[in-house]
Structure formats: C-alpha cells, structure tokens
Image (cartoon, coloured by chain):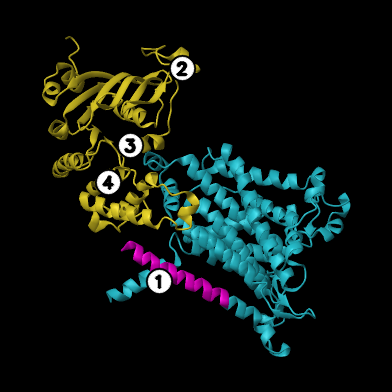
Chain colours: A yellow, B cyan
C-alpha cells in the first residue's frame, strides 16, 4: 500500500492528566535508519512503548507494513480528561499485546538491559526464536520437533557468529561485559526475525570506542539482515553518524524532523536542548 | 554438536531410570526370593522402608509438578493440594468396582456413577487371571490419566481469571481455590458422587499390583514398583518439557516477563500451559496418593499438604528437578521413619531424655527449615541438576 514500514498517526499517550506523547506523527521507510531524539523526559521511550504495544495509546493509530496494528480513542474516564487533538477521529480499538507485535516483525531492545539473567548467551538467543516455532506444545515436549530444534540451534550459532559472540556462547548472559550485553540484546531481538528493529538507547553507558563499534555494528546488521532501524539515542555522534533522518521530541511534541544536517541547524532543537533565555 | 551432547545425556538418564526401576523390583522382591526367616526386618513388606519409598514416589511427582510452576515459570501458586484432591477423587470415583459401590456409598443409597473402567475392561478381557490383571491395569491407567485431565481442566478455568495476578496475590487466590474445592467435595448434596465427607475406598491400590498365584501367595511384588514407574514416566515428561522450546519460554517468563513478552512469547498462553500441565501432573500424583493411603477423603488434602510440598521444593532447590526428587525422599524418610524416634520417649542410661516426646519431631523439623532458609537459601541443588554436578566434577578432573 505504502512504502513506509512504520507509520505513527496522531498518537497521543496521556497518563491521567499528563500528556507524555502529544499528537505524534512519524513515518519510517523501508531500509532507513531513523533516530528519535530529545531531552530527558521528552517521551521517547513512551513513544516506543506505544509502537511496541507495551502501552495502548490514548488516541491515534499505528500502521506497520501498510496494516493498521494499533488504534484507540479516549474511553471511560479518559473521555473527560483527554487534552489531545483529533479526539473523535478514531473509533476502533485495536490493542495487540507486545508478543503479537513482535510476531508481526517488530523487535526491540530495552533502555536498561533486560536479558534473561540465569540463561547462557546461547539460550538467550534460542529462547527468542521460540515465537517462530511451529511445533505445538505436546509435540515439542515429546521431542517430535528434532528438525526444527536443530535448525534453530544452527541459526543461533550463525547469528552469534555474525554478532561476534560465538566464543562466549556458553557463558551466563550477565557475566558478559556491558558492551557485549548490549550486543547480545540486539542479537536476541534479531532472532525473532524482525523487519523493523527498535533500539532504545543502545549506546547508553558506553565509552566512545564502544560507541563507535556499535555505530558500525548497527550499519552492518541493517545491511546483512535487510532491516529498518528505529532508535532512541543520546549520543549525538552516533545519531548524526548513522541516521538517515531524525525526529526530535520535546515535552511529548514533535518539534523537528529532517536529515542530520537540518536538525543540527534547527533553532528549535538547539533551544530545546540548551534552553532559551528568559527575556528573549 | 549441541544436539549430540544432549543425546548422550538422554541415553544416560534413560539407563539410570531403568537401573533404578530394576533396583526397586529387586529390593522389594528379596523377601519373596529368600526364605521367610532369613529376611532382615527392613526388607519385609511391612517395613517402613517401602512405605517411605511409595510415599516418596508419590510426593516427588507432586513436588516436581509444583516446581514446574513455581520454579520454572515463576508463578507462585499454592493450589497443589486442591489439584491433588481433584485427581484423587476422579480416580477413586472412576475406579471403585460396581459391585462394591453399594457398600462404599451406603449412606447415599448407592453411587450415582455406576461405572468403572476396571469393570468395563473386565467385560472385554475377563475378570480372572491374566485378563483380570490386564483390565485392572488398563482401568487404573485410564482413570489416572483422566484424573490428570480433570485437574488440568479445572486449572484452565481457574487460570482464566487468576493468572492475571502476580506473586503473592496468585498464591492467595490459588490457596483459596484449594480450600473451596475441599469444601465442595465434602458437601452433602454431592454425596452420591463424592460420598460427602466419608471416604471412598475399595478401589485398586498399589498392592493390587502384586502378582499372586492361585492360592493368593505373592509371587512378584510390584506395589512399590508401580508408583515409581508412574512417577518416573511423568517426571521424565516434565524434564523433556522443561528442556523443550516451551520450557525455555517458561524460564524466560520467570526471569523477565517484560522481555519475554517483547520477544514474542505470549504470556497468557504460556502461563496457562504451565499452570495446566502442573495441575495435570498434580492430579496424577493425587490419584497415586489415593492409592497409597487406600482411600480418597477430602479432609486429607489440606493447606498443610501444599506447604509440605512447597517445603520439599524449597529444600530441594527452586528450579531443580533432581533437587525436588532428592528432597522428597529425604523429607519423607525423615518425617515417616528416621526422625520418628524423636516422638517417642527414650531412656538412655536410666535417664529419661526430657525433650523426646510426641511433637518434638516437628520442632526439629522447624529448626532444620530455619537453618535451610538462613544458610542454604538455594536448597540442596540450587537450580542445578544432578548431571550438572557430575559434569563439573569431570571438568575439574580434566583440568587437573
């Protein structure tokens, strides 16, 4: 239908009286790397959570691969409280759980690493492949899925090879150094066979060298897995380096969008990050 | 490569199970093979040893099924006794021979369910000799499977509302369910089915599996072997499940629900699967418990029973199947046999020991539990399995 893989349409997320994301509109085209930036508390992660189904937006819709996957309108108590725009426009309620959205082909990582702690590196990736298994419960328990299991294991080994974690595959996920844990989280997301990868601050807490490695890594996986990447990041070097386009959020509102150069020279963005003089 | 190692391990485990089962047959048949007076007391069929082994086999299945839910899926449920009760009653109701029903249900003028699998198969294979044995065996098996199914079905309907709850709330809700079930089964109005507060008895028990000759003399004892066989099969199935892709998904849910959901694991579905599977095996173990105590009576399946099983799971290590099994036998042996002396008055050298009297056993038990909770929080095995320990030893030796 359309060439954009993800489209967020008039999405508003309101918690009680607080509007965390206000009338957000964004489009991501296939094969792009798009960054979502903004000062702390701008609502970036909330926007991510709306897209991945962790939160149900108060109003608005999300389209993925030309299909409407999420839609909501203010209901019940929210009808009175709703402060956003486009109030009466949406009538349907579509609220798939995060696992459904992942199965549609959208995988994410977390701002604070959420690996399965007592599982090995290999198992962490293997578990993520579970959502693509076709075997039913009984057949899997009675080991009638040899072939699939073997295939999955081989794919995990391959994937770990690609991301450079094969040599630590039997170690506990939490015993890895920080940078590798981040990498593992990305590998785990890749194991779900996504079309769109959402990275929530992948470089948080990394030193410049690790950040550079990560930048290269994200570019690599985009090409080798034919992905579209949507990321939240605070490291401007990384963002400016790899993004094709950037969206800037401030207090829940989209204040700018464009190429890295355009964003760097956008006065509103500079104001949002540095603040504006009182007497201006 | 990974698969290869698994295969070897699986064969070893299978071999170990077969050896253990053969060992059990041998152990309980020593008294048949040797002349009567040369058998040591411990090996006589009436010995505490066999009671402990039987109860251990029954409880180990209950403990492992609880561990599947609490240890592997991270759902803290206390409904175990309730599911065991369902299994016990289902088994009992479907297994009492029609001829005995009037006697069992005499207060209610006979049973509403005039049917038993044993009779059904009896009409096909005959009731005497080998045919009788086959029909009893088949009847027991099918009744046990149905016992599990009924428990799983109840679990499904309870799970629909209850599995939305987390940790303590889930525990309280399931605990409440177990109490309700207990009360319902004692309800007079259901008497023709459940025999009210009275016990249902005269269904096939473990000793029905002893093979006798025409004169009634036991030729081959299988009374201990039978619960071991069933428990081994069931526990092996749970092991397979835990190591399958679904089992891995359960562990992911235990460790991080949010991450599991984000990786495409349907929480509601997987929690329900775990809950129902656990209930199924709890039901089977309940049926075996009824066979062990030779009757089914609702008032036995108390909260205390759930706690006993929970205790076993904690002692054995939450998230370790071999730990649960080991702890079960230790616990049952201690409470039924080894620590019994604490309850009886003992005189040593003319001095009557002041502490040893009825109830002291429970004091010692409580102290042991406190020690475990304080110093060995992970239990005997932690979340390791027996083969893991062996593996580590060989690796250490290899390093030397």
Q: Characterize the local packing of mark 4: few (<14), some (14-19) or many (20 or more) Cα atoms within 10 angstroms.
A: many
Left or right of residue B282, residue A171 in this image: left
Residue placed furthest toward the top: A279
Upstream in sequence: badge 3 or badge 4 = 3
The CA distance from mark 2 to mark 1 is 60 Å
Q: Give the chain letter at badge 1.
A: B
Left or right of residue B106, residue B113 in this image: left
The CA distance from mark 4 to mark 2 is 39 Å
Task: Please give the label number shown on residue A187.
Answer: 4
Upstream in sequence: badge 4 or badge 2 = 2
Q: In this rendering, does residue A4 appear at all?
A: yes
Q: Position of residue B13 (x, y in %)?
A: 46, 69
Find out whether the residues at labels 1 and 4 contact each other: C-beta distance under 8 Å.
Answer: no
Badges 1 and 3, same chain: no
The CA distance from mark 1 to mark 4 is 32 Å
In front of the other: A49 or A43: A49
Residue at image coords 78%, 78%: B216
Under tag 3, what secondary structure? loop
Under tag 1, what secondary structure? helix
Left or right of residue A25, residue B170 in this image: right
Q: Disc 3 designates what residue?
A: A105
Q: Give the chain letter at badge 2.
A: A
The CA distance from mark 1 to mark 3 is 42 Å
Quadrant housing the N terminus of chain B: bottom left
Q: Which residues are magenta?
A: B1-22
Q: Nearer the viewer, mark 1 or mark 3?
A: 3
Q: Disc 1 designates what residue?
A: B390
In front of the other: A253 or A154: A154
């Amino acid at each position: 239908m359309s060439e954009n893989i993800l489209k967020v349409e008039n999405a508003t997320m309101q918690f009680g009286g607080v509007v965390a994301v206000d009338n957000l509109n964004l489009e991501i085209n296939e094969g792009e790397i798009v960054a979502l930036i903004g000062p702390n508390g701008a609502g970036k992660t909330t926007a991510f959570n709306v897209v991945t189904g962790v939160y149900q937006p108060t109003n608005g819709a999300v389209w993925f691969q030309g299909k409407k996957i999420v839609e909501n309108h203010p209901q019940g108590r929210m009808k009175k409280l709703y402060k956003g725009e486009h109030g009466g426009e949406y009538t349907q309620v579509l609220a798939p759980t995060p696992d459904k959205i992942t199965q549609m082909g959208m995988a994410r990582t977390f701002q604070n690493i959420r690996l399965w702690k007592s599982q090995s590196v290999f198992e962490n990736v293997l578990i993520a492949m579970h959502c693509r298994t076709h075997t039913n419960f009984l057949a899997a328990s009675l080991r009638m899925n040899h072939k699939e299991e073997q295939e999955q294991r081989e794919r995990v080994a391959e994937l770990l090879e690609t991301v450079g974690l094969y040599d630590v595959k039997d170690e506990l996920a939490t015993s890895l150094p920080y940078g590798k844990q981040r990498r593992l989280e990305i590998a785990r997301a890749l194991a779900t066979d996504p079309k769109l990868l959402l990275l929530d601050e992948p470089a948080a807490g990394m030193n410049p060298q690790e950040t550079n490695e990560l930048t290269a890594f994200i570019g690599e996986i985009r090409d080798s897995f034919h992905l579209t990447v949507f990321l939240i990041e605070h490291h401007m070097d990384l963002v400016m380096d790899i993004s094709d386009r950037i969206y800037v959020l401030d207090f829940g509102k989209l204040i700018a969008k464009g190429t890295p150069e355009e964003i760097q020279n956008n006065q509103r963005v500079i104001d949002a990050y540095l603040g504006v003089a009182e007497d201006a | 490569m990974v698969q290869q190692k698994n295969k070897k391990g699986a064969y070893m485990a299978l071999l170990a199970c077969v050896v253990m089962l053969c060992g059990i047959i041998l152990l309980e048949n020593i008294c048949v093979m040797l002349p009567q007076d040369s058998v040591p007391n411990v090996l006589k069929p009436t010995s505490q040893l066999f009671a402990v082994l039987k109860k251990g086999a029954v409880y180990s299945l209950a403990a492992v099924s609880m561990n599947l839910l609490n240890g592997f899926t991270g759902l803290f449920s206390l409904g175990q006794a309730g599911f065991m009760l369902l299994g016990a009653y289902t088994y009992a109701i479907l297994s009492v021979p029609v001829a005995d029903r009037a006697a069992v249900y005499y207060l209610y003028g006979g049973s509403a369910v005039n049917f038993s699998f044993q009779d059904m198969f009896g009409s096909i294979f005959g009731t005497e000799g080998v045919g009788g044995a086959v029909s009893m065996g088949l009847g027991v098996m099918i009744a046990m499977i149905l016992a599990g199914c009924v428990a799983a079905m109840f679990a499904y309907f309870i799970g629909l509302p209850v599995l939305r709850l987390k940790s303590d709330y889930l525990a309280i809700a399931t605990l409440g369910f177990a109490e309700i079930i207990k009360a319902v089964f004692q309800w007079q109005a259901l008497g023709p089915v459940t025999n009210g507060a009275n016990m249902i008895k005269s269904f096939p028990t473990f000793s029905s599996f002893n093979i006798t000759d025409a004169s009634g003399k036991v030729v081959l004892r299988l009374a201990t072997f039978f619960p071991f066989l069933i428990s081994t099969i069931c526990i092996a199935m749970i092991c397979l499940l835990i190591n399958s892709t679904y089992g891995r998904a359960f562990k992911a849910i235990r460790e991080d629900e949010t991450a599991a959901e984000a990786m495409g694991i349907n929480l509601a579905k997987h929690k329900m699967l775990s809950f129902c599977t656990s209930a199924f095996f709890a039901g089977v173990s309940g049926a075996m418990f009824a066979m062990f105590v030779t009757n089914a009576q609702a008032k036995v399946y108390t909260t205390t029973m759930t706690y006993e099983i929970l205790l076993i799971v904690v002692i054995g290590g939450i998230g370790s199947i071999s730990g649960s099994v080991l702890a079960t036998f230790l616990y049952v042996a201690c409470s039924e046999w080894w620590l019994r002396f604490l309850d009886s008055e003992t005189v040593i050298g003319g001095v009557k020991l002041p502490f040893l009297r009825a109830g002291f056993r429970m004091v010692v038990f409580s102290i042991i539990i406190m020690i475990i909770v304080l110093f060995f929080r992970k239990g005997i095995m932690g979340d390791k399995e027996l083969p893991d320990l062996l593996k580590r030893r060989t690796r250490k030796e290899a390093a030397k």
